[in-house]
């Protein structure tokens, strides 16, 4: 972490990242062109990009994009609110923590996609199906982080606050929350990615309206280029979601030692 | 106790939030002017083109039905949706309905949905092979690897049937389950020797130089009822007038589709992404308005022969 390393690093990392993208695109372009894979089934990268630009001109594409992002944001918001509330409450009460820990460890590893048959039965191919899957998957990511965060509170600081007669709410606001916030943000970053995966899965498998369903329709119409173009765009959304989560992290934790550069 | 309370609380709070987002179904309701809202579970494929045409032609509004189409990615999601009342009607292949009803699911077919063209060389579903494949007739499929979209369903029973009719032993076929979009690629790579395809994949595959061996639909019965529209017995019992209205509108839609193939090809643009060149040339199925009971019986017998069902399905209960 020398002083000199910072500017070089700052310049080099995006450049290397870009180089990686260019190389990956070149490989996808070359494989079908060289005949290593059949281009009827994997079109060259340039054709996927052309297919994508054609998509960008369609109103239905933007509608589907809005549905995907809307479902993602709503599911993520519900999971965040529920996860943070449940985490702070359970984490603050040792008895509750002890009672729920085995249940949480049992429920957490159940893959959300295993709930697909159930949600289809209850909600069919509509938004609530996607929301259940998203909330189920993302909730645990947030909850577990918040539990760790609450457990990380310095007992001396908490006891000090108590001896100064801070109310329960005051302790949560001034002691528990600042310690937990970095964990909440980590949970948010994990949950944001998981929520997108589940939104697309629900659209593709169940047929909930959105880009995933557009991929499914393109696929069942034998429109190979269009399928890949949409898959490519979903990948771009993934990168954007991750970038968004990192930006939120930087902004929320600008006071925290892990983000502040002046302390490094 | 606490544990239980917690999970109940977590689940019910999610449910409450969902309800606040408007999760409650609006299907099956009737408005003041006597129009009934119905949700219909369909798969976005060529087979259901008549319902899209019928909605555009106003056949459903004439019968005071306001249709909302919900597209599922597979028939597997539609049957449970209809049973649970999520959809009032659904579209499914006939063998799946026979399997479901032999397992005791309370389903009721309301009208035909899609059927073979009856022309073995020009049907909407067939078995294809590579152009230079040694497989020339159905009999040659014996002992080969054949890709189908679903194991133990209409496509395996009908392929078995045409192979047997041609003098081959269908028990020697090894079936490989692959989604329709992947079958042509598997044939090209040699992963399978043949594949059962339906439109538009059939036209795409033959356009890419593959050869059609036999139509497993027309080869089984010239009027083979491949798919049907259905509802639950519960809904049919409580809403006989809606079922009659839906059947009337659906039959009008199918008659219209049979008479206007160009409009069928055009309506495909609205819910599929089929290439325009393929849209023009693909083989359209037949949309009869009556269910050929003998052919359904034949499908049931084939399913029984192949061990898909052990109990004879109650055709009187299932068919309209």
Image (tube, grey):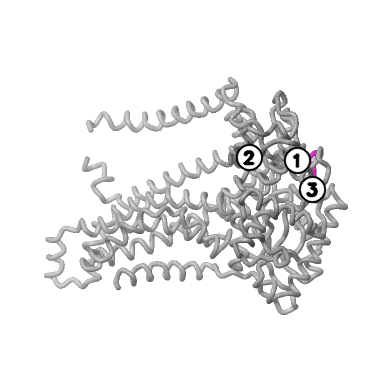
Q: Is residue B7 left or right of residue A255?
A: right
Residue at the image point whose x is 63% and y is 54% from the top: B75
> Is B282 covered by the magenta stretch?
yes
Residue at the image point whose x is 70% and y is 25% from the top: B134
Mark linked to residue B165:
1
Dot 3 lies on which element? loop
Measured along the vertical axis of the image, is residue A232 above or below residue B251? above
Count neighbours of disc 1 (C-alpha within 10 A) and say few if under 14, some if 14 to 19, many if 20 or more.
some
| Disc 2 to disc 1, C-alpha distance | 13 Å
Mark sitting earlier along the chain (3/2): 2
Measured along the vertical axis of the image, is residue B29 above or below residue A149? below
Quick check: can you spot residue A239?
A: yes
Q: Are marks 3 and 2 in contact (CB under 8 Å)?
A: no
- Overall secondary structure of the magenta stretch? loop
| Disc 3 to disc 2, C-alpha distance | 21 Å
Q: Chain of mark 2?
A: B
Q: Chain of mark 1?
A: B
Residue B106, position in %: x, y? 63, 67
Measured along the vertical axis of the image, is residue A41 above or below residue B75? above
Count neighbours of disc 3 (C-alpha within 10 A) and say few if under 14, some if 14 to 19, many if 20 or more.
many
Which residue, given by chain and number where applicable, does mark 2 sit on? B171
Count neighbours of disc 2 (C-alpha within 10 A) and say few if under 14, some if 14 to 19, many if 20 or more.
few
Write down the region rendered in magenta: B281-285
Dot 2 lies on which element? helix
Q: Looking at the image, is mark 1 or mark 3 nearer the viewer? A: 1
Mark sitting earlier along the chain (2/1): 1
Which residue, given by chain and number where applicable, does mark 3 sit on? B221
């Amino acid at each position: 972490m020398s002083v000199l390393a910072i500017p070089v690093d700052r310049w080099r990392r995006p450049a290397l990242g870009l180089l990686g993208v260019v190389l990956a695109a070149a490989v996808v372009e070359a494989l079908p062109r060289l005949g290593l894979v059949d281009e009827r089934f994997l079109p060259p990268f340039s054709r996927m990009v052309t297919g994508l630009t054609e998509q960008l001109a369609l109103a239905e594409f933007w509608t589907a994009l809005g549905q995907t992002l809307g479902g993602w944001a709503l599911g993520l918001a519900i999971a965040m609110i529920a996860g943070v509330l449940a985490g702070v409450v359970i984490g603050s009460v040792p008895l509750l923590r002890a009672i729920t820990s085995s249940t949480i460890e049992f429920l957490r590893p159940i893959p959300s996609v295993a709930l697909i048959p159930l949600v289809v039965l209850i909600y069919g191919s509509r938004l609530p199906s996607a929301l259940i899957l998203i909330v189920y998957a993302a909730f645990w990511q947030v909850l577990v982080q918040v539990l760790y965060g609450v457990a990380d509170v310095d007992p001396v600081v908490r006891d000090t606050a108590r001896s100064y007669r801070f109310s329960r709410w005051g302790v949560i606001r001034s002691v528990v929350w600042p310690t937990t916030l970095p964990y909440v943000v980590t949970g948010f970053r994990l949950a944001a990615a998981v929520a997108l995966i589940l939104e697309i899965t629900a659209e593709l498998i169940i047929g909930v309206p959105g880009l995933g369903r557009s991929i499914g329709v393109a696929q069942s119409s034998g429109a190979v280029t269009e399928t890949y173009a949409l898959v490519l765009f979903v990948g771009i959304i993934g990168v954007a979601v991750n970038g968004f989560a990192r930006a939120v992290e930087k902004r929320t934790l600008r006071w925290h030692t892990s983000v502040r550069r002046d302390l490094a | 106790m606490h544990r239980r309370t917690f999970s109940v609380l977590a689940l019910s709070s999610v449910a409450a939030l969902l309800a606040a987002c408007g999760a409650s179904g609006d299907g099956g309701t009737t408005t003041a002017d006597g129009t009934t809202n119905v949700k219909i579970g369909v798969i976005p494929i060529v087979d259901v083109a008549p319902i899209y045409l019928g909605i555009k032609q106003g056949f459903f509004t004439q019968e005071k039905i306001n249709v909302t189409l919900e597209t599922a990615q597979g028939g597997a999601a539609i049957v449970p949706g209809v049973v649970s009342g999520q959809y009032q009607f659904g579209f499914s292949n006939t063998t799946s309905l026979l399997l479901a009803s032999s397992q005791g699911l309370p389903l009721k077919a309301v009208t035909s949905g899609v059927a073979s063209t009856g022309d073995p060389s020009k049907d909407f579903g067939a078995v294809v092979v590579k152009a230079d494949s040694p497989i020339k007739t159905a009999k040659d499929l014996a002992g080969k690897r054949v890709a189908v979209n679903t194991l133990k369903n209409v496509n395996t029973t009908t392929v078995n049937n045409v192979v047997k009719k041609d003098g081959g032993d269908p028990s020697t076929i090894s079936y490989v389950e692959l989604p329709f979009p992947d079958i042509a690629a598997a044939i090209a790579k040699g992963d399978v020797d043949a594949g059962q395809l339906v439109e538009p994949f059939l036209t795409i595959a033959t356009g890419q130089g593959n050869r059609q061996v036999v139509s497993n639909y027309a080869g089984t019965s010239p009027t083979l009822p491949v798919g049907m529209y259905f509802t639950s017995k519960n809904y049919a019992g409580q809403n006989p007038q809606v079922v009659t209205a839906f059947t009337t509108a659906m039959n009008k839609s199918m008659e219209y589709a049979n008479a206007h193939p160009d409009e069928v090809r055009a309506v495909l643009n609205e819910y599929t992404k089929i290439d325009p060149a393929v849209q023009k040339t693909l083989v359209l199925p037949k949309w009869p308005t009556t269910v050929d009971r003998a052919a359904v019986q034949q499908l049931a017998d084939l399913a029984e022969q192949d061990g898909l069902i052990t109990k004879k399905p109650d055709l009187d209960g299932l068919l309209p």
